[in-house]
């Protein structure tokens, strides 16, 4: 039996937990809150919740109490929530065959599991921190004005040492993409289990293609290549291309407008509403510098949108160049502009490739993700 521990319930946690439960291999899921959008389709007796600090964090975010949720230092920061959660799990851990944890909330649980002779599985959802820090510090030099959006460049030494200690205690590291696996230090046992796509959307509203609608979706940071995308659109200077930016600003919106004033801003929303917006767009552009496997790529595929992404965005396996999208190099606004410009000149291509994209999305399932993991740990 396996205990799974993650402070929040998201799509990949839900996929693994339900698969373990189907195979009668789940002892329990530890999380902070498992209701509403974070609910899981398993018996309540198998869920152990540790909600209190997470509730304060959510309230602090909603009321804009920044001192309370400030990274690392805030009493209800995401770091504080993860560490308190880890302490709770380590103290209540029953002796099972294995424990399955995630980055930043595994250290004490892994130590307790090690003392009890349990296997320790570790899912790393983004590039290992040493690789990520190197790339992001280079970005801070390329675009100094974007440095406040990078965030991870300000991680404390203690936080980074904690990440290293978690990794060293793991018996096996599960990575969502080949890029994450390649970022690991030598000698770390690992496997790649790619996140799956949602159920494909067969129908799409007919729209006027006089303008190419290019969608960027994600936190508005140069970690996701937004500065390079703005640079590419500025290079194009084409009135027949419209840039739609959906995401959370990390600095005032006027900063982004000062670089490229004409983008259409869309606030974050539910997955259902995100997909509705995607169906009004023509292509997803995500020239990320540091990712694991950005979920928005799979959302776009499920809507039949071609993607223009870097290999670092983590969905290189989905892209058949020219048939489902394009891979562009990181830090290459000129190449990004060339690719977007070509799509704008060949708008019929968007509909021509839609069947292949939907077919690829149907082949990339969450069952495939969980099956890869289960074959390795059961």
Image: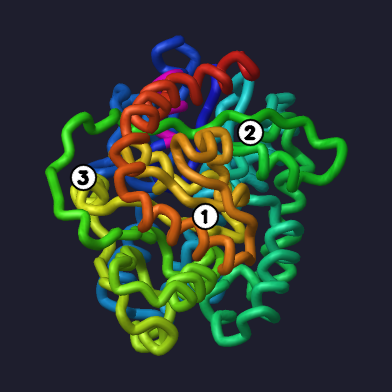
Q: Earlier in the sequence, mark 1 or mark 2?
A: 1
Q: Earlier in the sequence, mark 1 or mark 3?
A: 1
Residue 289 position, x and y percent, is 61, 60
Mark-to-mark CA distance, 1 and 2: 19 Å
> Residue at the location (25% across, 67% down)?
266
Region in magenta: 12-19
Q: Residue furthest top?
A: 23
* Disc 1 to disc 3: CB gap under 8 Å: no
Residue 322 position, x and y percent, is 49, 39
Number of the front mark, 1 or 3: 3
Question: Does 8 appear above or below 177?
Answer: below
Residue designated by label 1: 82
Q: Quadrant of the N terminus?
A: top right
Residue 353's mark? none
Q: Nearer the viewer, residue 42 or 136?
A: 136
Name which quarter of the figure residue 208 lies in: bottom left
Residue 271 position, x and y percent, is 26, 47
């Amino acid at each position: 039996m396996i205990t799974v521990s993650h402070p929040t319930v998201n799509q990949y946690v839900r996929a693994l937990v339900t698969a373990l439960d189907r195979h009668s291999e789940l002892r329990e899921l530890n999380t902070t809150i498992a209701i509403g959008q974070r609910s899981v389709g398993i018996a309540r007796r198998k869920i152990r919740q540790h909600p209190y600090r997470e509730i304060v964090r959510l309230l602090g975010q909603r009321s804009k109490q920044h001192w309370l949720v400030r990274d690392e230092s805030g009493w209800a920061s995401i770091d504080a929530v993860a560490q308190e959660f880890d302490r709770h799990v380590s103290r209540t851990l029953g002796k099972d065959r294995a424990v399955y944890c995630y980055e930043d909330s595994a250290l004490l649980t892994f130590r307790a599991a090690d003392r009890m002779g349990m296997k320790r599985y570790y899912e790393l959802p983004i590039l290992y921190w040493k690789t990520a820090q190197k790339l992001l510090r280079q970005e801070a030099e390329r675009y100094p004005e974007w440095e406040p959006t990078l965030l991870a460049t300000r991680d404390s030494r203690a936080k980074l040492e904690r990440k290293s200690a978690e990794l060293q205690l793991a018996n096996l590291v599960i990575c969502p993409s080949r890029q994450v696996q390649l970022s690991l230090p030598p000698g770390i046992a690992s496997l790649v289990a790619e996140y799956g796509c949602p159920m494909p959307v067969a129908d799409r509203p007919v729209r006027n293609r006089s303008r190419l609608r290019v969608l960027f979706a994600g936190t508005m940071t140069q970690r996701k290549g937004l500065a390079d995308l703005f640079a590419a659109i500025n290079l194009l200077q084409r009135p027949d291309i419209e840039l739609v930016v959906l995401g959370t600003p990390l600095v005032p919106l006027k900063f982004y407008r000062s670089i490229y004033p004409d983008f259409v801003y869309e606030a974050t929303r539910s997955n259902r509403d995100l997909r509705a917006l995607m169906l009004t767009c023509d292509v997803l552009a995500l020239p990320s510098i540091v990712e694991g496997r950005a979920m928005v790529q799979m959302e776009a595929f499920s809507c039949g949108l071609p993607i223009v992404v870097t290999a670092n965005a983590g969905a290189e396996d989905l892209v058949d160049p020219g048939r489902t999208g394009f891979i562009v190099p990181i830090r290459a606004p000129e190449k990004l502009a060339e690719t977007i410009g070509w799509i704008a000149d060949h708008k019929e291509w968007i509909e021509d490739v839609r069947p292949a994209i939907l077919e690829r999305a149907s082949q990339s399932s969450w069952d495939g993700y969980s099956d890869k993991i289960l074959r390795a740990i059961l």
